Image (cartoon, rainbow, N blue to C red):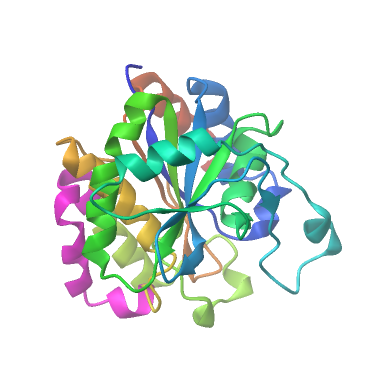
Amino acid sequence: MSKMPALFVGHGSPMNTFESNRYTRAWRTLGEALPRPKAILSISAHWYFGTSAVTAMEQPRTIHDFYGFPQQLFDYQYPAPGAPDIAALISETAKPFWVGLDRDQWGLDHGTWSVLAHMYPDADVPVLQLSLNGLRPLDYHVQLGAQLAGLRDQGVLVMGTGNVVHNLSTMQRELADHGHDWGIRFDRAVLERLESDPGRILEVQSHPDYALAVPTPDHFIPMLYIAGMAAAEGSSLSSFSEGHALGAVSMTSYGLGLDDAVLAQLRADEAVQGA
């Protein structure tokens, strides 16, 4: 590949860190099939605050930003190194958008490490996180994503991690591997837009199920960065894993610039696992 791909991963429950299911197996396949990145920039739903910043410490800490889960999850560590030089590159590439350098505040949260535990289980690739500026409108994130598209030429794997549909107030544990009808409809509308014209992704705000599917923007926004990258390059996204969990969460994931052979392998694996 001449460029590193970019990904949006539906990360779901932090318990996916330890589970083997069709989603985590897809993440493991990706880690084995993709060219080795110089660094990973994760854009996680779980660093949502009042500015745009990128982690710039040598050794980011593992953040356990949840409650009510088994102790095993709180004990988990993902000791990937940071990359202050790549953080500086990201800040420079983002201009004219301002992205600050966070040298001591954040780290790697479960939106990042629950996925990378499968993609790169040895934690031997440098990892950085980009925050979501919750004070900016949605089009800001699309535009910033477009500005960061050049990172793919620098060996950086950009990974948005969240969930297109994320409404935990509607969660039903008996729907472990299923979605509510409204979530399935909205997820399909997003898929159709990303596979045809990702530059118009924000038109899904007018979808009748948008308010239920996206009651808060945090898990939706990471996808917008990858859509912005695709639009900047005149490309579209391809889904490589689709599904729902607990009624309330879409696990659908997308890739930009994935090799056809990799996509075929991921889809074949999913078909076998879903049979």
- What residue is rendered at 48% in x and 20% in y? 35
Residue most extreme to the top: 1
- Which region shows up in magenta? 193-213
Q: In the drawing, does residue 17 fall left or right of residue 160?
A: right
Where is residue 97 drawn, in percent x and y?
Answer: 27, 54
Q: Is residue 123 above or below residue 106?
A: above
Residue located 25% across and 55% down the image: 142
Query: Can residue 141 be seen here?
Result: yes
Horizontal arrangement in the rendering, residue 194 relative to residue 15 (left or right): left
Residue at image point 53% right, 44% down? 128
Most foreground residue, 274 or 29: 29
Q: Is residue 184 above or below residue 108?
A: below
- Asked which quadrant contains residue 204, the reply is bottom left
Q: Quadrant of the N terminus?
A: top left
Up-down: is 104 above or below 81? below
Q: In terms of depth relative to the viewer, which is nearer, 186 or 32?
A: 32
The quarter of the displayed image where residue 273 is located: top right
Percent position of residue 187, x then y? 33, 60
Vertical placement of residue 68 versus 149, above or below: below
Residue 139 in the image, given as x and y percentages of width and height? 21, 62
Query: Residue 41 at what x, y percent from top left?
Result: 47, 42
Q: Is residue 203 magenta?
A: yes
State left or right for residue 156 relative to residue 76.
Answer: left
Q: Is residue 219 rendered to the left or right of residue 135? A: right
Q: Main secondary structure of the magenta part?
A: helix
| Residue beneath the point at 30% across and 46% down | 94
The answer to whether residue 240 is seen in the rendering is no
